Image (cartoon, helix red, strand yellow):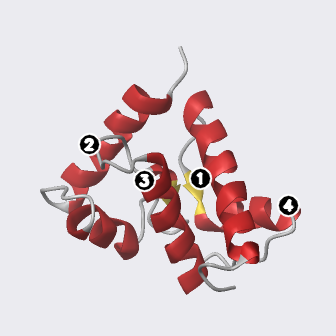
Amino acid sequence: MRRGTSEYEAAQEAMAEILLERARNGDWPIQYGQLSKLLEDEGHTVPAHSVEMDHLLADVSHQESPDREKAMLSAMVVLKEKGEPGAGFYRLAREEFGRKGDNVTIWGEEMKLLARDFRQS
């Protein structure tokens, strides 16, 4: 699956819908493997720990926060072993979203932003 293809765009849309629904319901975090399975259930093969997963998470985060002011939806996706996002999340947060601080600070702030920006009362 390559960026710019209809297959990729469909997977991105499906991921956005899944993450937005979970964000609104406060149903997070979600493990990479769980997200992969939910995407597979909708007909999209996106292995949990793949370049495609990283790209989709980055693109969905940009899609839902084009000005970088809202929370990164990718913040709610965590590693099963650690219970926190993978290295790609922190790289994206710092390099493309301008987030500052250590990993704990960045993730904690994103979780607060998720509740502020997406959680339905």
Where 25 falls versus 38 (above or below)?
above
Q: Which sits in the foreground, 20 or 64?
A: 64
Q: Amino acid at mark 3?
A: Ala
Give the tally of numbered discs: 4
In the image, taking residue 50 as reference, residue 91 lies left or right, namely: left
* Contact check, label 1 and label 3, Cβ < 8 Å: no
Mark 4 vs mark 3, foreground winner is 4
Marks 1/3: CA–CA distance: 9 Å
Residue annotated with mark 1 = 30
Residue annotated with mark 3 = 75
Where 43 falls versus 30 (above or below)?
below
Q: Quadrant of residue 53?
A: bottom right
**Residue at the farthest top position:** 121
Image mark for residue 42? 4
Residue at the image position 35 percent from the left and 74 percent from the top: 87
Where 109 falls versus 61 (above or below)?
above
Image mark for residue 109? 2
Q: Residues within 10 Å of mark 3 (few under 14, many from 20)?
A: many
Upstream in the sequence, badge 4 or badge 3?
4
Marks 3/2: CA–CA distance: 10 Å
Residue at the image position 42 percent from the left and 59 percent from the top: 84
Mark 1 vs mark 4, foreground winner is 4
Upstream in the sequence, badge 3 or badge 2?
3
Marks 2/1: CA–CA distance: 17 Å
Marks 1/4: CA–CA distance: 17 Å
Q: Amino acid at mark 1?
A: Ile
Q: Amino acid at mark 4?
A: Glu
Marks 2/4: CA–CA distance: 31 Å
Upstream in the sequence, badge 2 or badge 4?
4
Q: Secondary structure at mark 3?
A: helix
